[in-house]
Image (cartoon, rainbow, N blue to C red):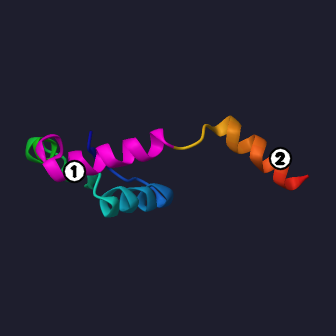
Amino acid sequence: MAQVVVPSGAPSYIQADAVRERGVGLTASADEVDADLLTRALGDEKLRDAAAEVRDEMAGMAPPAAVVSRLVELAS
């Protein structure tokens, strides 16, 4: 599912840019959020497809426990 990100501080602007640039959502100020924006986020096929791609990418990633174990192994 696509996201609507309303950034409110320095880190959230970076995250909002990443969401928009990856094509998985829209960014807006609080004043810009309206029914049309939400309808677009829910109905835009390109946003949905990109969100599904990211979901699948994340599902294929190693779980955190496996990554930590590997980092400990490398640090030894």
Question: Quadrant of the rendered structure where residue 28 is?
Answer: bottom left
Part of the protein shown in magenta: 41-60
Which of the numbered marks, if any, corresponds to residue 72? 2
Write the residue at 19% across / 47% down. Answer: 33
Q: Is residue 16 magenta?
A: no
Q: Determine whether label 2 and label 1 are within 8 Å by CB.
A: no
Q: Is residue 15 left or right of residue 21?
A: right
Q: Characterize the local packing of mark 2: few (<14), some (14-19) or many (20 or more) Cα atoms within 10 angstroms.
A: few
Question: Quadrant of the rendered structure where residue 26 is?
Answer: bottom left
Give, as a three-letter code, the residue at label 2. Val
**Badge 2 element:** helix
Which residue was labeled with disc 1? 47
Q: Is residue 40 left or right of residue 15?
A: left
Front in this rendered view, residue 43 or 9: 43
Write the residue at 32% across / 50% down. Answer: 6
> In this view of the protein, can residue 4 be seen by the observer?
no
Considering the image in quadrants, where does the N terminus appear? top left
Q: Is residue 44 left or right of residue 15?
A: left
